[in-house]
Amino acid sequence: MTTTSSAARPAGAPAPAGRRRLRTARGAPAGSGRRPPLVLLVPACIAALFALLPLGYLAVRALERGPGYAWDVVADERTLQLLGRSLGLTAVVVAACLVLGISLAWLTVRTDLPGARAWSVLATLPLAVPSYVAAFAWLAAVPQAAGFGGAALALTLVSFPYVHLPVAAALRGIDPAQEEAARSLGHGPLRTFLRVTLPQLRPAAAGGALLVALYVLSDFGAVSLMRYDTFTRAIHTSYRASFDRTPAAALSVVLVVMTVTLVAAEARTRGRAGHARAGTGTARPAVQLPLGRRQPIALLWCGAVVAVALAFPLGTLGYWLAAGTSATWDLAGLADTAWATLGVAAAGAALTTALALPVGVIAARHRGRRAQLLEQAAYAGHALPGITVALSLVFFAVRYAYPLYQQLPLLVCAYAVLFLPVAVAATRAAVLQAPPVLEDVARSLGRSPLRVLREVTVPLAAPGVAAGAALTFVVCMKELPATLLLRPTGMDTLATRLWTETGAGSFAAAAPYAATLILLAAVPSYLLGRHRT
């Protein structure tokens, strides 16, 4: 009988198909090193160019008065101060979100915590609270909270679910055999977690931390209410205070460079790790760790987080609804505004998910500079202030597509540019969870790349992609700066009405819109938490 071995195989000859499949089943991404098919590459390039559109606007604006003037703005001492403030705020919020997100995910997934499923869902619901509502609640109760501490607190409490959700999903997908082996060798629970479990959580935690960092860098509402100067607030002030757009554009370029650096660092941290499972793909549940006498401490920790992140802002809104004197309950206007918010958020989520699908599949299944550039391009627009993205689209529409000016499609496009990374990250994680060997089998049976995508990849990743769409829907509902500038004449969303009333000092009048916004955003957030549990 003739056998094929590495010694007998000529140099450069491909490995046998069975061996290639074996390597894939061990976790290497399918398609690694292979050029992405055109059915993915073409729409991914369109999505990347779409996301890079604001950068073209920035390049035109930043160089409008010459490179020397732009450099003077970037090298100014004030710019360096803003850089330090933005990076400091981002570092603190990311660190706090990692602690909150990982600890809650561990307690609700891997321990016998009473009511673990309910705690996991409650830990997801802060996604429904806009950062400016959280900041308003804390300022109303503790005016001294204004500044760095208040901004860090408000942003942490609304963004830690970005870490909690992917880490909890990763904990459910990790094969517990390695942890059981570590414990059989005498390692305690803490040492097993630090040396075995935590390294496997690194891709999920890094992806969540990246979303938090980008969210903090692009936030405008919370830092404005807390009166803490960051790049976004300085850019917004510069746009509003002067007709000269060059300084704001130059500051935005610095923000983009920070974004690319963060995305590259996250990609390096993520490495080549994946979550694909060999065999049938059926997950074996891990044995839950008994908390014993530490159970009250765990319950107290979960209760404290939910209380400050969810109960406190809701209680503040309830107070203003009950005790306010300037509230005007225009139910018809409130219903129209809520309906407009739902419609524009749904359209934004649909377009964003459609653009993210090819980019996410390529990022998960293909390695190389091309895939890396496409993914990084998709992230480019997320750290831009909403007003910068909005002005770039206005610039584009006025010059090249005037019928879109001040129309709903332009606002939906702004949402897609801003929140494409949210959908890309969810799609990439969902595709990584799907066994790549099934796609290899489909290709070996003669299926075209489009049929493999339609019949294998998308159905396997559909729950994760749908979760990403729900998350995108929530963030579209809460978006404020771009909506203020791009909304069609006569149209209001809950966020813009809330901002208008708050700006006029009518906190009680703003409360119904804030409460409705949180209520509507809580529905997909709740379903998202249920899906992940």
Image (cartoon, grey):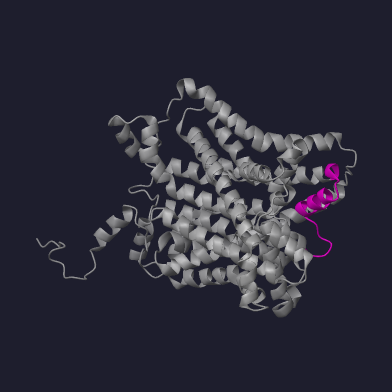
Q: Is residue 62 above or below residue 444?
A: below
Q: Residue furthest left?
A: 1
Q: Is residue 114 visible?
A: no
Q: Is residue 493 magenta?
A: yes
Q: Is residue 378 visible?
A: yes
Residue drawn 29% across the image and 30% down it: 184
Image location of residue 156, percent across then percent down: 61, 43
Q: Nearer the viewer, residue 23 or 136?
A: 136
Report the span colored magenta. Answer: 487-509
Please state if 429 lies on the left or on the right of 440 as rendered. right
Please state if 3 lies on the left or on the right of 46 as rendered. left
Q: Residue furthest top?
A: 293
Please state if 441 lies on the left or on the right of 11 as rendered. right
Please state if 399 lies on the left or on the right of 176 as rendered. right
Q: Quadrant of residue 74?
A: bottom right
Residue drawn 52% across the image and 71% down it: 45
Q: Nearer the viewer, residue 295 or 459?
A: 295
Image location of residue 357, percent across then percent down: 52, 62
Q: Is residue 404 above or below residue 530?
A: below
Q: How many marks?
A: 0
Q: Is residue 89 magenta?
A: no
Image location of residue 379, percent across then percent down: 55, 62
Q: Which quadrant does the N terminus fall into?
A: bottom left
Image location of residue 5, percent across then percent down: 15, 61
Q: Quadrant of residue 133?
A: top right
Residue drawn 70% across the image and 49% down it: 222
